Image: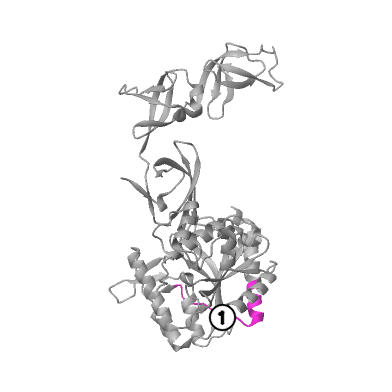
Amino acid sequence: MTRYATNEFKTGLKLIIDGDPCAILENEFVKPGKGQAFNRVKLRNLKTGRVLERTYRSGESVEAADVLDRQLQYLYHDGELWHFMDTDSYEQLAADRTAMADSAQWLKGEELCEVTLWNGAPLTVLAPNFVELQITETDPGVRGDTASGGSKPATLETGAVVKVPLFIERDEVIKVDTRSGEYVGRC
Amino acid sequence: MTAWRQGMLAARAELYRLIRSYMAESGVLEVDTPVLGAAANTDPQVAPLSTLVNHPGKPDQQRYYLHTSPEFCMKRLLAKGSGAIYQICKVFRDAELGGWHQPEFSLLEWYRPGYDHRGLMMEIDRLLGRLGLPTASRISYQHCFQRHVELDPHHSTMAELAGRCHRQGFDGHGERRAVLLDFLFSRLVGPHLGRESPVFVYDYPACQAALARIRQDDVPVAERFELFINGMELANGFHELGDADEQLQRFQAENAYRKQAGKPTLPIDDGFISALQDGLPACAGVAIGLDRLLMVLTHSQSINDVLSFPLD
């Protein structure tokens, strides 16, 4: 079983805390002049998303979370689970609502997603940074208005709602940045 | 590079000038002692750096330790009758790096024969006044610990302390009392200290005596103090232990703890012990972190901001 000593701690390192996989967000060295040195660590629980704080005596070690990042292709949603496939081995894996978090709203099928696996099961799913999706519903476009800077909501084919410029029309395909949820441009 | 701003270089030069003029006026002699020594500080919470030195005509290299503080050599000078002395020097500590820590940093170390820790706190106040800082308030370790941790540091059981640690995200199970107190103090107390004005925390639990005398009140307390400004510890001072036998026992106990904790044991400074046997005048001493003091004076957030070339 791999363990990490406090001097290996850095942002992004994944540890097991109270049985759950967590990723280090911040690592701070704390030491009284005449006393014990500590590492004060802020972590995100990768299962619940909750942020927690732990302190370790410098020199202690903590169990490593045996997580693995894989590129998997999104297949379909069965109403409960989202199904993915390894395009080399054709192995299929299913992610639940917690693992999908905000990523589900950007997927329509065949996208390659970064799936973090823990004990062989999807823990988190990241949609591609950019997706191209068709608008299914929005107010009629304001012709020629490309400069006023106004925006309106538009519903995409996956159900996601993004703010788009006023000149954008229904049925157009637009590019969206999934990390910010923002409109990038027309396709 | 903030440190390259002319202002930062000038601020350090001005700080050193003010310290030296204060010391000269007060009759405290500036001294210089070696950085390299065959012996080291055995404090298990401090890790010395060492280096190997070749001597001409000798086949074996000699291991020397870089001082973690000049206190042993300065006390040897006191025992020889130097009178009040101070030193501004670089000291070295391994495995310390962070917003308040660098492996190499600058100390002002200062001894006053005939003073106890209370007398020395008053003199530090005068020096801080010269630097434009307000007068420090004073609070006992017990008082501020009770206020912020809601436990008595001297009388609480290990289970009570460990329970409080656990609620703050530290598993204190099986740790020594000093470690639990260090965690709770640095987590819950330190950040509140010295926000309005500088503050001296005095009378530490006996398990954190280091090189301080222990006084028998209703509980034994170490005659030790620390200075805090903006939640940051700037200085540590003692009413100095002068008993050679007790000092040797503390060093041996520290080496025993080092061995048990899997840390290297270190050669005890015999020259220092024999100086104590010859007789160290009753005195108080303090070490002030000059880089941190400069952080306070220049409103800097990180020690790196006040150094010309920090390690990272």
Side (left or right) of B89 relative to B261: right
Q: Position of residue A17 (x, y in %)?
A: 41, 45
The residue nearer to you, when weighing B123 against B310, is B123
Q: Is residue B147 above or below residue A140?
A: below
Q: Quadrant of the C terminus of chain A?
A: top right
User: In the rendered structure, which segment of residues is drawn in magenta?
Assistant: B18-35
- Can I make out residue B108 in this image? no
The residue nearer to you, when weighing B236 against A112, is B236
Side (left or right) of A6 relative to B141: left
Q: Position of residue A11 (x, y in %)?
A: 47, 44
In the image, farthest residue toward the left: B59
Give residue A76's quadrant in the image: top left
Q: Identify residue type, mark 1.
A: Ile
Name the residue rendered at 36%, 31% in the picture: A121
Q: Is residue A141 magenta?
A: no
Q: Position of residue B231 (x, y in %)?
A: 60, 59
Q: Dot 1: within a 10 Å radius of its alpha carbon, few (fewer than 14), some, or many (20 or more) residues?
A: many
- Can I make out residue B216 in this image? yes
Q: Which residue in the protein does label 1 denote? A: B85
